[in-house]
Amino acid sequence: MSYLNDPRVFFATERTLLAWIRTEVAVLGFTFVIKKFALELADGALSVASLEFIIWFLCLGTCLLSLLSVIQIFFSLRKLGPEEIPTKYSKSFMLFVGIISLLMNVGISMIIIEMSPI
């Protein structure tokens, strides 16, 4: 990136990370709703096995999305020069937030997958 001496570049990267996290939370919420529907649909016409496949796919996709967002933020922050990072802000904190998001997505995905039928 060019040296713009503008903190808006850093803040745009931060907003991008937060948008990725928002999308991941929305997909996990949708996955939880599908899992709850699958638990209530033990005798229904739709196969529970096909719903389980969809749940696995969404959970793995969310974890992959989280990993890719951390990688994207890492490379975006690496391209920024010291002039573009505002004072009192840290690159490492943004990466820390991304890694915590990744770990939480993996943990929540494992909880959703392991929910057993009643």
Image (tube, helix red, strand yellow):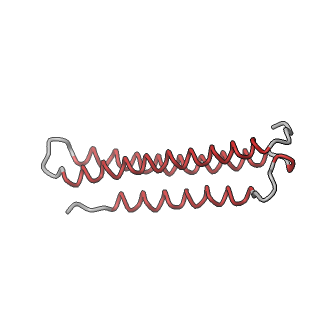
Q: How many marks?
A: 0
- Counting from the top left corner in percent of width and height, residue 54 is at 34, 44
Q: Nearer the viewer, residue 53 or 4?
A: 4
User: Residue at horizontal 78%, vertical 45%?
Assistant: 7
Q: Quadrant of the C terminus?
A: bottom left
- Counting from the top left corner in percent of width and height, residue 93 is at 69, 60
The answer to which quarter of the image holds residue 117 is bottom left
Q: Can you say whether 39 is above or below 30 in the image?
A: below
User: Residue at horizontal 27%, vertical 53%?
Assistant: 36
Q: Quadrant of the N terminus?
A: top right
User: Residue at horizontal 41%, vertical 46%?
Assistant: 58
Q: Is residue 15 left or right of residue 75?
A: left
Q: Is residue 9 left or right of residue 29?
A: right
- Counting from the top left corner in percent of width and height, residue 96 is at 65, 60
Q: In this view, which residue lies farthest toward the left? A: 43
- Counting from the top left corner in percent of width and height, residue 10 is at 74, 46
User: Residue at horizontal 53%, vertical 61%?
Assistant: 103
